[in-house]
Image (cartoon, helix red, strand yellow):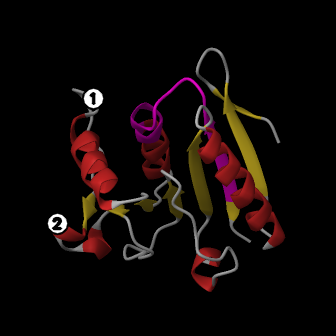
Amino acid sequence: MTEVWFYHLQRETLENALPPLLQKTLERGWRAVVRAGGQERVDALDAHLWSYRDDAVLPHGRAADGFPDRQPIYLTAGDDLPNGPHALFLVDGAAPANWALPDLTLLERIILIFDGRDEAALAEARRQWTAAKAAGHPATYWKQSPAGRWEKQA
């Protein structure tokens, strides 16, 4: 079964936390899809990933860019997985319609990132944890330490 990792943001914003996680994904030789809660967020992430650091770029694309199957990181607000990803990042409340979908078993890992300062996002993450576990996915919970590092909690 596909591993599901839950990342609980407490000190960082999504814009600060996502790029290093995507970089680690690429370093593993994996492709990724980032599924956002809406097209506005996709557009904002698209701009951010090109300029998040002066000395680094994360190669990525979205439907408007064409060639979705060639993108190392594909940004979307839909359910598509056009680049044969190893990892699916779920942000801004994006979640699978059903954790038992066959497409999800083709992934190595699903990474759900949620803002722990938002009660609704926290409650939704708890619902997704329960649904992922019920579908048989091994789930891991990561929380930011006071120093901003990710620590495995469960």
For mark 2, what is the residue?
Answer: 65
Q: Residue at x 37, y 77 (%)?
A: 82
Q: Residue furthest top?
A: 147
Q: Residue at x 80, y 36 (%)?
A: 153
Residue 133, compared with residue 150, is above or below; it is: below
Q: Is residue 38 magenta?
A: no
For mark 1, what is the residue?
Answer: 53
Residue 103, compared with residue 94, is above or below; it is: below
Q: Quadrant of the C terminus?
A: top right
Q: Quadrant of the N terminus?
A: bottom right
Coordinates of residue 10 in the picture (x, y in percent): 60, 28
Where does the magenta region start and end?
A: 4-19
Coordinates of residue 63 in the picture (x, y in percent): 24, 70
Query: Disc 1 on helix, strand or loop?
Result: loop
Coordinates of residue 107 in the picture (x, y in percent): 58, 70
Coordinates of residue 93 in the picture (x, y in percent): 53, 55
Going by the numbered disc 1, the residue's amino acid type is Arg
Relative to 129, 22 lies left or right: left
Q: Residue furthest bottom?
A: 102
Q: Of 113 and 68, which appears nearest the observer?
A: 113
Q: Residue at x 31, y 55 (%)?
A: 42
Instruction: Kindly tell me whether residue 72 is visible in this rendering.
Output: no
Q: Residues within 10 Å of mark 1 (few under 14, many from 20)?
A: few
Residue 44, compared with residue 115, is above or below; it is: below
Q: Residues within 10 Å of mark 2 (few under 14, many from 20)?
A: few
